[in-house]
Amino acid sequence: MICRCFGKAFDLAAVGRGARETALLMLGVPDYDAYVAHVSTAHPEQTPATRDAFFTARQDARFKGGGLRCC
Amino acid sequence: MDMSSSPHQAARVRLGVSGALIWGGTAILGAASLAILAVHRGETVNALWMVTAALCTYAIGYRFYGLFLARRVAGLDAARPTPAVLRRDGMDYVPTSKFVLFGHHFAAIAGAGPLVGPVLAAQMGYLPGTLWILVGVVFAGAVQDFIVLAFSTRRDGRSLGDMIRTEMGPFAGTVASVGVLAIMFILLAVLGLIVVKALAASPWGTFAVAATMPIALGMGLWLRFVRPRGVLEVSAVGVVLLLAAIWLGGRVAAEPALAALFTWSAPTLALVLMAYGFAASVLPVWLLLAPRDYLSTFLKIGTIAALAVGILVTLPELHMPAVTRFVDGTGPVFAGSLFPFLFITIACGSVSGFHALVSSGTTPKMLASEADARMIGYGAMLAESGVAIMAMIAASVLQPGAYFAMNAPAALVGGDVAHAAATISAWGFAITPDALTRLAHQVGEATVLGRAGGAPTLAVGMATIFSGVLGGDRLMAFWYHFAILFEALFILTTIDAGTRVARFMVQDFAAMASRGGVRVPALASNLLATGVAVAGWGYFLYQGVIDPLGGINTLWPLFGIANQMLACIALTFCSVVLFKLKRARVAWTTLLPTAWLALCTLTAGAEKIFAAAPAIGFLAHAAKYEAAARAGGLLVPAHSAAQMRQIILNDRVDVSLTALFMAVVVTMLACGVRSAAQARANPRVTAREAGDDMPLLRQGV
């Protein structure tokens, strides 16, 4: 779906995907599709982790060193 | 402002006629807004002027100074591959869209600091604090965040401590680590104190915050065992449950039997907080710590956005004078004169050393191009400064009399509305006892007196702004407790995560000290180190809770000193690297803020130790209690000779800690001078950047 505003065209679906990706990264979870794409091109012999396993591994990694938040 | 062009493209673009007009107009508009804020002497002034002044300052700072830093100081090169590209692994190193990464970085640096500091600083009027927030962020805070991010990106995304060890030597690295551990203790204590001040004798707030525990546990279990991928949906449900808990809290507070269950004294809350910090950092992170982190992240971003919209829609009038008589240092909220104490009271909104840890953490590993570093490093800090400006607006929306009633300690204004109103009116901020009672009733609390620490003041300001948009007076109490919950939630997240960080540091130091000679079972080591970490901040928290001046008065300056000290360390490191890169001609960009922060922290530290006034100087305070103890007398809050001795001991501990901070600053400055001198003596570039020895990699990107 394309929305026009200020004379520019915005792809709303892409904006939505971007918002979702931002929200996930705020929780320390990078983009799963990018991970799968990376594994299939750089390490084609490996099977990428499932979406669930990917989340769990990222959650553990985020707090491994303590998970510093700012004041 | 043009965020899309790379530094190199933009560098070649000269300001055309239209550009000159636009930027000239922005400069004039910003200057005019500041002038209106500065010379205004009427009853009230509109927040619009503060918003305009801030936005114009940020736009000009980003477009001109940020670009100068990107080109001439950091020497960014859009063609040079970043760690995310070179080491891409799909997990830690991922080239990420700059807008997505901006959100991540901002969420990681935004916290309670930029909200609380300006509220406390408002006792001197809105003007001094606002000027420091704007000048400080452009020339110190955003510079630090941006340059550390750029240097870490050139070093495989390594941490600040790591980089200091490599560029300045192992001794400087160890000194910096000691400094960071000491900061953790004082930071967690002060943040804990803010929560205690907000929740003491407040069944509504206490219930809402307590309700976050079962909600987080449920989320944690669901995410681990049922549907890990559904984290956004689960978090959304969690936020809805939180809102329900705030509503339910109002019902609980209205039932005397239930209210009694959640009415806790400040010392009890302090002990509960310590137990919580211990439990949350020992339990598996996915059970409690991580889901609470998710809740607080979304609530934080949502509330900041809502506050921005609220301010822009209502454009409230500011009732606080531009400058109050308390610039002379006699203010009730924090003791000490404008210089140096204003500059350490407002820490995070203008410059925060903690951001150097974030800028050298996950962000540099995800930067897709060096050209994005300005928007993320410099830009996100400008946004954080904007949060501080909003906090200043929220605090200035209150009637000054109400502001002082909430923030002045009972020891100064008395414990009931009649005394408080009389004292504060005598200071020149007219307020009636009725108005104070009515305000407490409006926000659904028994009293608003003595609620120092920034959070409740901000909550009243936010409630006033929000209820202007939605719900009117009827929803004022809901919005007040929403704001309290929001702050308590992300402070608790800092406390549990910070306790874990401190625990790892304690374990590192123990391993270093014993040189691997002592073997301790993992569980025992974990529990022991967590105990040390909790005791470290718990000691200062408890001390603050029983302080007759309310604790914030004493401890917030220590936190400010600690935070600015860390910024001073980070900027010293940046300066050293600039000398090693043979960019001495632009080293003033980091040397100036380093010098200013060193001056502020060392002056403030010296005053906290040696000032003759017991309200400021720890030694004078100890001497006063010693004299009274020798005469066999008791001074509040002591009820026994043992408590008198405890207070004197606390003063001495505070003296030692302040002295430690000062020693760390002086040592790091000395290390910096030595490293810079060595770099100048060497005719070659001596900084070690990853990729310099791999020229082939620079082609074709």
Image (cartoon, coloured by chain):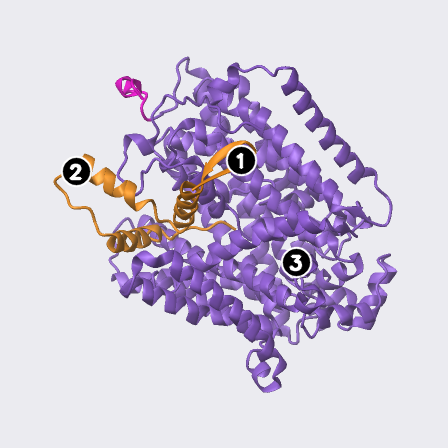
Q: Are marks 1 and 3 on the same chain?
A: yes
A19 to B594, vertically: above or below: below
Could you tell me which secondary element the residue under label 2 belongs to? Answer: loop
Residue under circle 2? A43
The residue pinned by badge 1 equals B379
Q: What SS does tag 3 mark?
A: helix
Q: Looking at the image, can residue B649 be seen?
A: no
Residue B206 is one of the magenta-drawn residues? no
Q: Are marks 2 and 3 on the same chain?
A: no
Residue in the picture at 54% in, 52% down: B657
- Asked whether B698 falls inside the magenta stretch, the response is yes
In this view of the protein, which residue sits in the foreground, B416 or A49? A49
Point out the tag, 1 or 3, that comes first from the N-terminus: 1
The chain letter of the purple chain reads B
Bounds of the magenta segment: B690-701
Residue B478 percent coordinates (x, y): 62, 67
Amino acid beneath label 1 = Gly
- Front residue of B610/B155: it is B155
10 Å neighbourhood of mark 1: few (<14), some, or many (≥20)?
Answer: many
Question: What amino acid is found at the position of numbered circle 2 in the picture?
Answer: His
The residue pinned by badge 3 equals: B466
The answer for how far apart the CA atoms under marks 2 and 3 are is: 52 Å
Marked residue chain, label 3:
B
- Comparing labels 1 and 3, the label whose residue is closer to the camera: 3
> Looking at the image, do the residues carrying marks 1 and 2 touch, with CB atoms under 8 Å apart?
no
Residue name at image x 54 percent, y 27 percent: B2
The chain shown in orange is which?
A
